[in-house]
């Protein structure tokens, strides 16, 4: 695949976020090494537009994200629509949250185009046949902890850039921006499911999806359930591909979440029944509710799955209750952990943004290849334009910094 300058395009998106930080409800910090940290919901409120722009940055500037409305059953609900004409690069080379960032006491799931520089998921990038060279790097960290300078230095080394050219966007699951950026992953989850099932995703030509916007939950545990359920039971994805009809006839029925034996209940309930052990959940559950695929070679269209309003209603009305999953995070041996009722805090973090819990332990010295990490988890555009930033020239940001902290 051609180097599409995913990081430079994302860097251009981020510069606009920095320029409008106060309006977006985000905070910009400059670490001692020069790295920029954009807090999109940890210590600040963030918001819908912050989440929308963060999602576009995660796609390396090759996707458009818009807030809209969706009807399922008798409910009209806010939703997130996403589309891209470069789905393999935008969704898997960039947006997919496949890098488990672990350094010292810090842990977060990394998504965004900096992964194409780090290449921790070597097998994935080899199958995509994608390589990128860049002197800037943009990474989204899904966590409730802001990174330290040591963490930023570690990520910069892995990405091969000077720390002053690194941007880290931080967003927790239980936040408005977190809900938006997860709901913007409907096409990504379909692409990842195709990849897992052995389909060459480079044959996917275009992708568009819509997903209900999960209401913010009171804690990260319930937010993990709601954000997953939004895609599993409410996500609709349309893809165009070039393939054989016989291949698609066999493949498409396996794509939606309903093809999994774990389908049918809100994820929080499923997890609670399994002691919050993500390893006991079928990883193929994590896919959109409905998938429609058109074969451009023959003009035939294939459809499988359906939205499940009943499960969505149950999931979106859930809240903390007696015996529920607590994420009051105490200090244990110098590391933040939550009493996960038999599970692990890392697993909960890893579940953000449609994650399958197969944690890749990356040391400071080098990445250790452990196979691929399964981490699929309005328009208020700048100057009133839909998908602001999609046409940005990445070369325009070469010598510009991100502005004051």
Image (cartoon, rainbow, N blue to C red):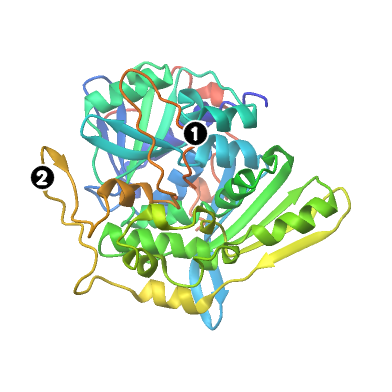
Q: Quadrant of the C terminus?
A: top left
- Residue on which the image places disc 2: 331
Residue name at image x 11 percent, y 37 percent: 334
Asked if 382 appears above or below 328 in the picture, the reply is: above
Asked if 9 appears above or below 204 in the picture, the reply is: above
Residue name at image x 81 percent, y 46 percent: 243
Q: Position of residue 296 (x, y in %)?
A: 83, 49
* Residue 86 vs residue 28, the one in the foreground: 86
127 left or right of 248 in image: left
Mark 1 lies on a secondary structure that is: loop
Q: Position of residue 89 (x, y in %)?
A: 61, 35
Q: Earlier in the sequence, mark 1 or mark 2?
A: 2
Q: Position of residue 216 (x, y in %)?
A: 33, 63
Residue name at image x 39 percent, y 21 percent: 158
- Residue on which the image places disc 1: 371
- Mark 2 residue crowding within 10 angstroms, few (<14) / some (14–19) / many (20+): few
């Amino acid at each position: 695949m051609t180097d599409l300058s995913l990081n430079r395009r994302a860097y251009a998106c981020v510069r606009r976020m920095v320029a409008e930080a106060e309006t977006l409800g985000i905070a910009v910090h400059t670490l001692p090494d020069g790295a920029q940290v954009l807090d999109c919901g940890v210590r600040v409120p963030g918001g819908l537009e912050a989440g929308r722009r963060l999602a576009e940055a995660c796609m390396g500037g090759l996707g458009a994200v818009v807030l809209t409305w969706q009807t399922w059953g008798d409910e009209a609900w806010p939703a997130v629509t996403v589309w891209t004409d470069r789905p393999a690069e935008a969704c898997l080379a960039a947006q997919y949250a496949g890098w488990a960032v672990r350094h010292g006491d810090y842990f977060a799931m990394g998504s965004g185009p900096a992964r194409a520089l780090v290449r921790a998921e070597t097998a994935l990038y080899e199958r995509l046949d994608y390589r990128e060279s860049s002197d800037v790097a943009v990474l989204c960290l899904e966590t409730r902890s802001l990174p330290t300078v040591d963490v930023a230095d570690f990520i910069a080394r892995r990405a091969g850039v000077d720390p002053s050219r690194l941007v880290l966007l931080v967003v927790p699951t239980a936040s408005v921006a977190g809900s938006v950026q997860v709901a913007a992953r409907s096409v990504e989850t379909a692409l990842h499911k195709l990849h897992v099932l052995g389909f060459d995703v480079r044959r996917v030509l275009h992708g568009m999806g819509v997903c209900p916007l999960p209401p913010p939950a009171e804690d990260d545990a319930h937010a993990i359930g709601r954000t997953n359920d939004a895609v599993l039971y409410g996500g609709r994805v349309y893809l165009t591909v070039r393939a054989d009809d016989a291949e698609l006839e066999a493949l498409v029925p396996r794509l939606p979440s309903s093809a999994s034996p774990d389908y049918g209940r809100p994820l929080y309930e499923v997890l609670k029944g399994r002691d919050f052990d993500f390893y006991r959940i079928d990883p193929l559950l994590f896919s959109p509710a409905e998938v429609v695929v058109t074969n451009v070679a023959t003009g035939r269209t294939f459809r499988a799955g359906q939205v499940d309003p009943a499960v969505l209603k149950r999931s979106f009305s859930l809240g903390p209750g007696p015996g529920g999953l607590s994420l009051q995070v105490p200090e244990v041996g110098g590391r933040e952990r939550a009493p996960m009722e038999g599970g692990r805090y890392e697993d909960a973090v890893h579940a953000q943004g449609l994650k399958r819990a197969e944690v890749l332990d990356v040391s400071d010295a080098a990445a250790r290849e452990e196979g691929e990490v399964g981490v699929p988890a309005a328009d208020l555009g700048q100057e009133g334009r839909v998908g602001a930033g999609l046409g940005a020239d990445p070369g325009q940001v070469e010598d510009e910094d991100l502005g004051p902290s």
